[in-house]
Image (cartoon, grey):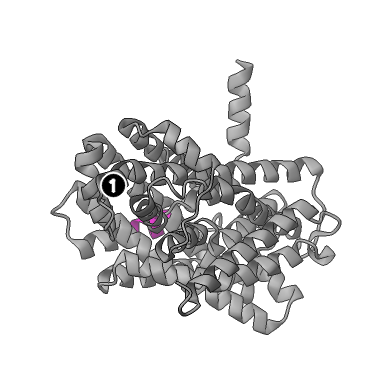
Amino acid sequence: MAFFRSIRSLWKALGPGLVTGASDNDPSGIASYSIAGAKTGFALLWALPFAIPFMVAIQEMSARIGALSACGLTGNIKRHYPTWLLAIVSGGIIGANVLNIGADIAGMTSAAQLLFPTLPTMLTATLFTILIVGMIIWLRYATIVAVFKWLALSLLAYVAAFAIVRGDAYDMLIHTLLPALAWDRETVLMFFAILGTTISPYLYFWQSSEEAEEVRERNTRIRVCKFRPLSDNRLNVIELDTAIGMSFSNIVAYFIVALTGATLFSAGARDVETIAHIAEALRPLAGEYAYTLFALGLISSGFLAIPVLAGSAAYVLAEIFDWERSLDKPFSRARAFYIVLALSAFIGLIVPLGGISPVQALFYTAILHAIVSPPLILLITHMASNKAIVGDHISSPTIRGLALGACWVMAITGILLIIPGIW
């Protein structure tokens, strides 16, 4: 009985960290992990556990900034840093988010058509967008968080799909514990895609804003974008939530790579470029159950990720212009915030309706992430050491070191990929 009470207490404590981590496995991310598995097999499995400490460090700093200032990253940049920096950061994150939303809507539509082939593309994409936006506008914050937490658990469908396939566990373990990065452009590109998909800028903004919203929900009279201390217990809960959420995210991603590595790569089906190609190639190799789980997981991940992407874009503009911003406020009290959220989703709808493939959108999003992430990580590291924002609750040297490590790994990998003639 005590064990179940502990589980219930832990589940109740989980929130922004778990939701943020799970939203990282969005449809475009699932496509990226699947393509990596299909093209390289188990060779890059080590990259997922490798990324966990980097991801935890960056998200822990973002969460700390939001919780201690009751304000998201954008609001703090506006208050403490130059205007030109605010313009560059906000423009980059909004552009990347809208493109990512488009890739995710296209991915959800493709997944739905796998299960129901006669569904019209334009109508399905539009209905998904309307349903997601309506859910965010009409549901209260507590309900949204509860729904998101259960949607996060639905991503375990990929673990179940791998269990059905029964891949070579010994071979997986070897590739996980003994990293091997082949020095060819395709493998390095896949590694870069995994990093760009896993360590995504929208995660920083969303978790920071949601931690700030949690603080404001507890104290409605609090002054935003101004440091206020929190108890060590509260900060420990935030750190635990973040560590569990990011670990969960990478465990799911690990099994997506393992699933496609054990089936598509092993069978020689390596030239997959769309979600439909991946699923259709998976069907005869993994069976009907794994195929269905793959498609359902894609749809579920979109319902989780698109509100996070659109919401983080809305928080960015709301903090710039000091609009009312809260998922707990009715539409009438935060009209501009919800309009931006809806517009972000519907502008993203242009991607599937405009004939741009999910893979193209994923490629362009990865480029934007490559441009935005390294300098943004440097900025977040500075903010997590700025006493005007976090007071004496400065992130530890280990956390800051891991974040800077992620910055340099992403920057160096990106530079290697664009140097002419290196390959």
Q: x and y percent of residue 21 in the render? A: 54, 49
In terms of depth relative to the viewer, which is nearer, 208 or 334? 208
Is 115 positioned to the left or the right of 249 in the image?
left
Which secondary structure lies at badge 1?
Answer: helix
In terms of depth relative to the viewer, which is nearer, 114 or 309? 114
Q: Residue at x 31, y 31 (%)?
A: 164
Quadrant location of the C terminus in the rendered image = bottom left
Q: Would you say the magenta stretch is mainly helix, strand or loop?
A: helix
| Residue named by callout 1 | 264
Extreme residue toward the left, this view: 118
Whether residue 93 can be seen here: no
| Magenta highlight range | 129-135
Q: Residue at x 48, y 58 (%)?
A: 191
Extreme residue toward the bottom, this view: 84
The residue carrying pointer 1 sits among few (fewer than 14), some (14 to 19) or many (20 or more) residues within 10 Å by Cα, namely many
Q: Is residue 358 above or below residue 116?
A: below
Q: x and y percent of residue 206 in the render? A: 57, 59
Is 305 positioned to the left or the right of 4 in the image?
left
Extreme residue toward the right, this view: 392
Q: Is residue 240 above or below residue 84?
A: above
